[in-house]
Image (tube, rainbow, N blue to C red):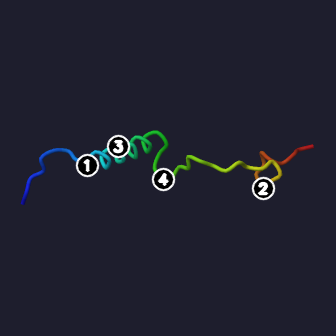
Amino acid sequence: MQKKKGITLDDYLRASRRGNREAEQELLGPGFHSHNRTHKSKKLYSRKEKHKERP
């Protein structure tokens, strides 16, 4: 079995991605969090109370 001679670019990228994932989970909590959302139309129907007009 050969020993590694140093940190390769692949090792660096894996460690960086893992660190970013852990930092994001600390901030936002576990689970999926979207970064890019499509623009929501004002005309889009919603049943939620906060979107209903109250006379």
Q: Secondary structure at mark 2?
A: loop
Circles 4, 2 touching at the beta carbon (< 8 Å)? no
Residue 2: x, y in percent? 7, 57
Q: Which residue is mark 1?
A: 11
Q: Which residue is mark 4?
A: 31
Q: Secondary structure at mark 3?
A: helix
Q: Amino acid at mark 4?
A: Gly
Say which label, 4 or 2, has the lower sequence index.
4
In this view, the mark in front (3 or 4): 3
Instruction: Between residue 7 and residue 50, name the one nearer to us.
Output: 7
In this view, the mark in front (3 or 1): 1
**Total numbered labels:** 4
Outermost residue toward the right?
A: 55
Residue that appears at 88% across and 44% down: 54
Q: Amino acid at mark 2?
A: Arg
Q: Which residue is mark 3?
A: 19
Q: CA distance from mark 3 to mark 1?
A: 12 Å
Say which label, 3 or 1, has the lower sequence index.
1
Q: Quadrant of the C terminus?
A: top right
Relative placement, left or right, of 25 versus 37 is left
Q: CA distance from mark 3 to mark 4?
A: 16 Å
Residue that appears at 77% across and 45% down: 50
Say which label, 1 or 2, has the lower sequence index.
1
Say which label, 3 or 4, has the lower sequence index.
3
Say which label, 1 or 4, has the lower sequence index.
1
Note whether 23 is above or below 34 in the view shown: above
Say which label, 3 or 2, has the lower sequence index.
3
Q: Secondary structure at mark 1?
A: helix
Q: Secondary structure at mark 4?
A: loop
Q: Quadrant of the N terminus?
A: bottom left
Residue 47 is tagged as 2
